[in-house]
Amino acid sequence: MDEFAFIERMKQSAYRQSSLVKGVGDDAAVFRQSARDIITTADTLLEGVHFSRTMMNPFYMGYRALAANMSDIAAMGAKPAFYLVSIVIPDSCSDDELNSIYRGMSSAASSQHMDLIGGDTVSGNELSIAITVIGFVAQDKARYRSAARSGDFVFVTGTLGDAAAGFHMLNTPKGYTDRTHYENSHCMPQIRSDFATRLESLNRVALNDISDGIANEVNEIAEASNVGITIYDDWLPTRSSFTQFSMDQQRNWKLYGGEDFELIGTVAEKEWETLKLIAANTNTQLTHIGYAEPSENNGHHVTLIDHADHKTPLLKKGYTHRSSDKNG
Ligand SMILES: Nc1ncnc2c1ncn2[C@@H]1O[C@H](COP(=O)(O)OP(=O)(O)O)[C@@H](O)[C@H]1O
Ligand SMILES: Cc1ncc(C[n+]2csc(CCOP(=O)(O)OP(=O)(O)O)c2C)c(N)n1
Ligand SMILES: [Mg+2]
Ligand SMILES: [Mg+2]
Ligand SMILES: [Mg+2]
């Protein structure tokens, strides 16, 4: 299949978003907006770094690539609408493999009625999927990492460490229970878009998504908001079958694992009940995991309190590119 046949094949036959004026087929796409703020994000998934072609079915590569980008839109409290895909395709990638990657993206897109409106196709040595997503939010309702205030409740959606456990299971074919859940958490992460867009009714929310591990993301909120944060280890939500893993694995995966694509944030105590209602109405597990506090000497420290009441600093450590300190 040549480049032009490939583009024709990947093109949607109809579009879902009413604000789209021009989709795939010209030099660029056009959409029209008036009253809403526009949110844009880009993330790249690269063979060997984010997925291995021997371990992962191409449908999941596509699904995860778009889901990772949808998660950043959700982390802004916004609704995803459009995506553009720039793909580098090695000669070893078959037409069937390519079709499956696009079917995976299309499956992730359909849950939020998103449209594929453009991209780029290049031949190269390693499979790379770089996606841009465009979303919308009511004016001034984008949710920033800098919005946390002392006294806020810190919350997280879903359970932690499942994607890292799933990645471990995919590399360890024997043993373990509840495999389907963990492997799906890695291959087809559930993005909290519905929960995130319903946050529009709240006055103030700080929000971040967990791509690199909660230790990293909670520190990003503390830094951006210039607050201290205390997290209670016992309150961190994990799945009941998570106890099948060693204590070291549990600790490492829930704090530093990454790729859970759950949301972590803070709200004022007086908005906690409304937040609980939004979670219940969107079928989202919601857990109160700690508190935001005044910053100490202008330091934005995150503290982890364990079951024996011991306090340790929770350092900004997780999956980091261009660093030798990788825990993912
Ligand atoms: N190569 C780059 N050029 C410009 N901006 C970048 C680049 N890489 C990351 N950013 C920006 O830096 C910020 C943090 O990026 P990142 O850590 O990847 O966030 P996330 O973990 O939410 O994906 C974002 O605003 C992102 O757009
Ligand atoms: C083959 C393979 N090795 C390692 C990982 C683990 N891993 C890769 S990237 C990553 C963190 C998230 O990716 P990043 O590019 O940092 O996303 P962003 O923070 O920009 O959203 C993790 C945990 C994986 N998914 N697959
Ligand atoms: Mg990124
Ligand atoms: Mg993010
Ligand atoms: Mg990252």
Image (cartoon, rainbow, N blue to C red):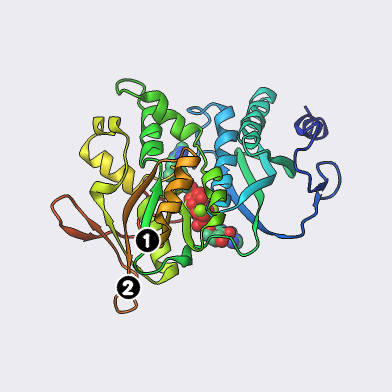
Pointers 2 and 1 in contact (C-beta within 8 Å): no
The mark found on residue 269 in the picture is 1
Residue 162, given in percent of the width and then of the height, sits at 38, 36
Residue 68, given in percent of the width and then of the height, sits at 54, 44
| Residue 253: quadrant of the picture | top left
3D distance between C-alphas at marks 2 and 1: 15 Å
Residue under the image location 74 percent in, 44 percent down: 120
Crowding at dot 1, Cα within 10 Å, few <14 / some 14-19 / many 20+, comes out as some
Q: Secondary structure at mark 2?
A: loop
Which three-letter amino acid code belongs to the residue tagged 1? Glu
Q: Is 147 in front, or is 322?
A: 147
Crowding at dot 2, Cα within 10 Å, few <14 / some 14-19 / many 20+, comes out as some
Which three-letter amino acid code belongs to the residue tagged 2? Pro
Residue under the image location 42 percent in, 48 percent down: 276
Q: Is disc 1's CB within 8 Å of ligand 4?
A: no
Which residue is farthest left? 308
Q: Which residue is mark 2?
A: 294
Q: In this orientation, does residue 146 appear? A: yes
Residue 20, given in percent of the width and then of the height, sits at 80, 47
